[in-house]
Amino acid sequence: MPATATSAPSGTLTPHAPSYYAHSAHAAPPRPPLQGATEADVCIVGAGYTGLSAGITLAEAGMKVVVLESAQVGWGASGRNGGQIVHSFSRDIDVIERQYGPAVAEPLAKMMFEGASIIRERVKRYGIDCDLKDGGIFAAISERKAKGLHEQKALWERWGHPGMQIVDTPNDVRRLVNTERYHTLLVDPTGGHFHPLNLALGEAAALESLGGRIHEGSEVTRIDRGTHPVVHTRGGGQVKARYVIVAGNAYLGGLEPKLASRSMPCGTQVIATEPLGERGDALVPSDYCVEDNNFLLDYFRLSADKRLIYGGGVVYGAREPSEVKSLILPKMLKTFPSLEGVKIDFGWTGNFLLTLSRLPQLGTLEPNIYFSQGCSGHGITFTHLAGRVVGEAIKGDATRFGAFARLPHHPFPGGRMFRVPFTAMGALWYQMRDQWGI
């Protein structure tokens, strides 16, 4: 995905993280590194959800698309995430309206539920096998936190999203999520969950069926500006294009320093238990995905083979934790004490890209070089939307792209040296609030 993925030995590809997703992924065809020079209408840097979504949008319109991926399709966040469909943005539309006004918020609000629709449309249209299931739950651990769920329900209903339900009696809560931890649930039938790496692989196959080309093991080292930019790879390959899309997100590294100064990679951790069978069904009888509404949230769901996939926590600055299982297991047992002693088959970590505002960043580096980054932990639906609106802009209608591009892109205070400690201090305060249930 990124320009800075760890180099693999000559002739091999950087392996996927040791995740349950990599273990259970569908077979993929070889996608050799780019050799020599080629031309395209659009060259995309990164074969994650953003790049693949943009590529499909453009290829469906008949444009010639080449995607350059330094590792493998879905190697970064797109193949490691929690696999949960959650609407809106990392900062919800009320925050955007309060900070930037109705004129900025309204066009974004009209798109806040579209990413999920894009995923479902493409799964159906291209026959993507990714264990897609409907239904999502937001959970509050206290009465004070429950207030936030009522506010979220009212906000989303205001912007045209009916059908959600508040569940706040203990018996009804446990019929959906069998734990004593939660005070109130907000049930969204249009949420959902899926196998994220298989979604990425399916989208890559969809793009190729439309004539797009994907080159793995093709790390981008520089982009020459101009009327027809030229994208260079470490192996000496070149793509001359009319347009370029930079979609490396948390794994972009130093390819474009201007983008790196406005964002910060952060690590999150996930574990997967052994298959639990009927025991898993008893833990999550609804088979919906679940996330709490804490600032540093936990999230979990059952996989197709009834493993509990449980994630949470943040490591600022993308430091690799020495033992993922030791970080996440206490969280899982706090929610489900009955899983004491269960075998943890997989533990992995991955990076998401945080922005100072917690809002995504879309824009241009040159009139013909587009970028999208900074989903701030809320990227599954947004990356699919972002790919579509960037594609729309390249096709000639930048209205929706401009609605995002007008959001300010602030650098972190103190530059790269101080962005980690400043952000970690702020997160510590919110973590304390989470522990107090406020």
Image (tube, rainbow, N blue to C red):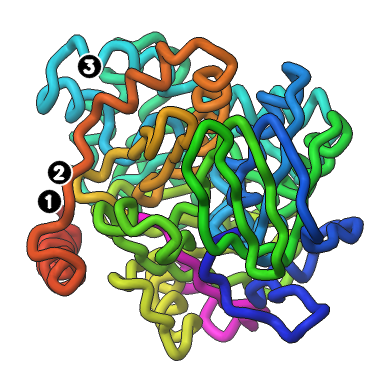
- In percent of width and height, residue 395 lies at 59, 16
The segment highlighted magenta reads: 336-353
Task: Report the Cα–Cα distance between label 1 and label 3.
Answer: 29 Å
Let me know if residue 249 is in the magenta part. no
* Sequence order check, earlier mark of 2 and 3: 3
Q: Residue at x 28, y 39 (%)?
A: 359
* Sequence order check, earlier mark of 1 and 3: 3
Q: Residue at x 14, y 64 (%)?
A: 415
Let me know if residue 338 is in the magenta part. yes
For disc 3, the neighbor class at 10 Å (few under 14, some 14 to 19, many from 20) is some
Residue corresponding to mark 2: 144
389, above or below 386, in the image: above
Residue corresponding to mark 3: 104
| Camera-side residue of 331 and 107 | 107
Kindly check if marks 2 and 1 are in contact, taking CB atoms under 8 A apart as contact. Answer: yes
Task: Report the Cα–Cα distance between label 2 and label 1.
Answer: 6 Å
| Camera-side residue of 51 and 320 | 51
For disc 1, the neighbor class at 10 Å (few under 14, some 14 to 19, many from 20) is some
